Image (tube, helix red, strand yellow):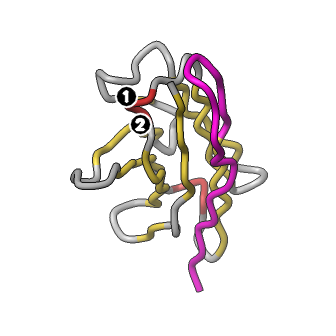
Amino acid sequence: QVQLVESGGDLVQAGGSLRLSCAASGIVFRIYSMYWFRQAPGNQRELVATISSNYATNYADSVKGRFTISRDNAKNTVYLEMNSLKPEDTAVYYCRAGAAFWGQGTQVTVSS
């Protein structure tokens, strides 16, 4: 059974930082590209960052220079380091493994 469990979401002031984690089980983690998405109320889910199996990364323009995605294959975990947070970063953040497997999400709220 595949499980993706996100953690690390919190309420933080603008300008602050958070690190999200997504722990995977039931998959051969190292071969999967991993993704972080987010969804704010009333908005579509949007892709925030990706990291491939060979550690290539990509970011949405809105988070470039502020967010960093990384992975630890020994721990079957992908991370999203978020700095200089803005109120518009407020959303539920989801991780995804490959094209099919989603986590349940973790809430990030940035106060102004």
Question: What's the magenta region?
Answer: 1-19
How crowded pointer 2 is (Cα within 10 Å; few <14, some 14-19, many 20+) is rated as: many
Residue drawn 45% across the image and 40% down it: 90
**x then y, percent, for residue 70:** 60, 35
**Circle 1 sits on which residue?**
59
Residue located farthest toward the front when viewing the structure as drawn: 112
Q: Which amino acid type is marked by label 1?
A: Tyr
As for residue 46 lying within the magenta part, the answer is no
Residue 35 at x, y percent in the picture = 43, 48
Q: Is mark 2 on a helix, strand or loop?
A: strand
Mark 2: amino acid:
Ala
Dot 1 alpha-carbon crowd within 10 angstroms: few under 14, some 14 to 19, many 20 or more: some
Residue 71 placed where, x, y %? 63, 41
Q: Say which quarter of the image contains residue 68.
A: top right
Q: Is residue 7 magenta?
A: yes
Tell me the distance, in whole angstroms, between the alpha carbons under discs 1 and 2. Answer: 4 Å
Is 56 situated above or below 105? above
CB under 8 Å between callouts 1 and 2?
yes
Labels 1 and 2: the sequence-earlier one: 2
At 61% from the left edge and 26% from the top edge, which residue is drawn?
A: 13
Residue for point 77% across, 53% down: 75
Instruction: Find residue 24 and report its horizontal and vertical position in percent.
Output: 64, 64
Indicate the secondary structure of the residue bearing disc 1.
strand
